[in-house]
Image: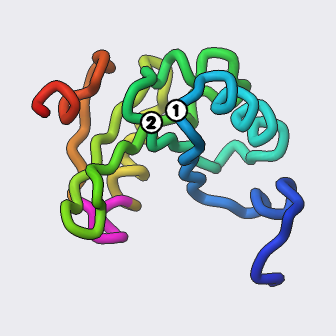
């Protein structure tokens, strides 16, 4: 494998998990998702690190919306290894379970919300 490529299709080939971390501007996020949606497989999970947008708002127009989830880490993640897992109503159970597994595998402590709420849990606590 080539260590890197500027070609999105090549980046997404065989991808298991994609973590989007673009600026908190809805138009930019939707633009990125439209591009990813073209090339992602039916087995790939698309996750956002958003701290403010509901997963349903981010994924409502996606072809692969059942594969979309929010995995919102607490900052700084190397100091506080907590990550909020927030599915949309249409996120598949496989995606929720696998996202929790991946976060645990990389040393994070996932907390899963069963219903999306504005501000998620961590922002509301702060």
112 or 33: nearer the viewer: 33
Residue range corresponding to the magenta coloring: 103-108
Q: Quarter-wise, where is residue 93 in the image?
A: top left
| Residue 31 is at least partly visible in this image | yes
Q: Pick the quarter of the image with the N terminus.
A: bottom right
Q: Is residue 104 magenta?
A: yes
**Residue appearing at x 47%, y 36% in the figure:** 69
**Residue appearing at x 58%, y 27% in the figure:** 25
Q: Position of residue 6 (x, y in %)?
A: 86, 64
Label 2, residues with CA under 10 Å away: few <14, some 14-19, many ≥20: many
Q: Quarter-wise, where is residue 7 in the image?
A: bottom right
The circle drawn on residue 24 is 1
- Label 2–label 1 contact, CB within 8 A: yes
Mark 2 and mark 1: Cα distance apart in space: 7 Å
**Residue appearing at x 40%, y 29% in the figure:** 87
Q: Is residue 110 magenta?
A: no
Which residue matches tag 2? 50
Mark 2, secondary structure of its residue: loop
**Residue appearing at x 61%, y 27% in the figure:** 65
């Amino acid at each position: 494998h080539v260590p890197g490529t500027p070609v999105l299709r090549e980046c997404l080939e065989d991808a298991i998990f994609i973590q989007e971390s673009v600026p908190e501007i809805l138009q930019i996020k939707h633009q990125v998702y439209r591009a990813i949606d073209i090339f992602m497989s039916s087995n790939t999970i698309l996750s956002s690190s958003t701290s403010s947008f509901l997963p349903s708002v981010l994924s409502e127009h996606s072809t692969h919306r059942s594969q979309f989830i929010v995995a919102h880490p607490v900052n700084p993640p190397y100091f506080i290894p907590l990550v909020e897992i927030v599915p949309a109503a249409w996120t598949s159970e496989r995606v929720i379970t696998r996202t929790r597994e991946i976060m645990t595998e990389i040393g994070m402590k996932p907390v899963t919300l069963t219903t999306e709420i504005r501000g998620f849990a961590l922002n509301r606590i702060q």
